[in-house]
Image: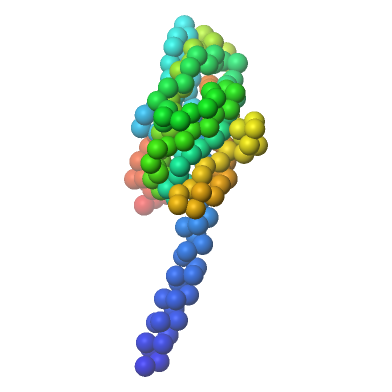
Amino acid sequence: MKALLVVTVFLTAAMFVAAPAGAQTTPTVSVFFDKGLTRMDEDCPAGGGMDSAFVVVQGFNAFIMAVEYAINYPPSMNWLYDYGFPPVTMGTTPSGITEAFPVPQNAYNPIIVARVVFMWNCDGCTITDDRLIVSPHPVAGFVQAVDFPNYEFIKAVGMTSLVCATVPTEETTWGQIKSLYGE
């Protein structure tokens, strides 16, 4: 009987300890340079040209009905237009945009909420660490979403993507990382 009591107390305590860990996920709005959502940095191509990037919400751990943010484009990029929005959209990404969805979106997983089209304003990486920053919506003053069914605001963090990063990242596998430590 004592063992059952100890197990019950342990499981109850584990539920309370585990619940806040999941709740501590920080919601973010980010810009990725690939549809696979793996690259938040990009080198400026030689000769410039037109390109696009994806605006992604992730880590909200909720269903959302709307999202609002702005994007500060670096000098190496000239914003041209936005597309791929839900039916109700006000504003543009450089001036501040609010997007509302007709049905709740599952933001327990990453969601591409927009695609931005821009022209590269550089010829190779002559400028380094040029920052593309997701910033607060100028009217609301926050990067945020509206949850469903409570219609409460969920504050988020706007992430920074880099053009011509001075510390490039290298794609690798978990096995390659473990091999560095003798595993």
Residue 85 drawn at (x, y percent): 42, 28
At a point 43% along the width and 25% down the height, the residue shown is 115
Can I make out residue 100 in this image? yes
| Residue with the most extreme bottom position | 1
Q: Quadrant of the N terminus?
A: bottom left
Can I make out residue 39 in this image? no
Asked which colour scheme the image uses, the reply is: rainbow
| Vertical relation: 74 (above or below) 57 | above
Nearer to us in this view, 125 or 100: 100
At a point 45% along the width and 44% down the height, the residue shown is 64
At a point 58% along the width and 38% down the height, the residue shown is 143
At a point 63% along the width and 36% down the height, the residue shown is 140
- The reply, left or right, for residue 157 in relation to residue 10 is right
| Vertical relation: 111 (above or below) 91 | below
Nearer to us in this view, 157 or 43: 157
Nearer to us in this view, 98 or 116: 98
Residue 42 drawn at (x, y percent): 47, 23
Residue 146 drawn at (x, y percent): 51, 44
Residue 162 drawn at (x, y percent): 54, 26
Nearer to us in this view, 91 or 110: 91
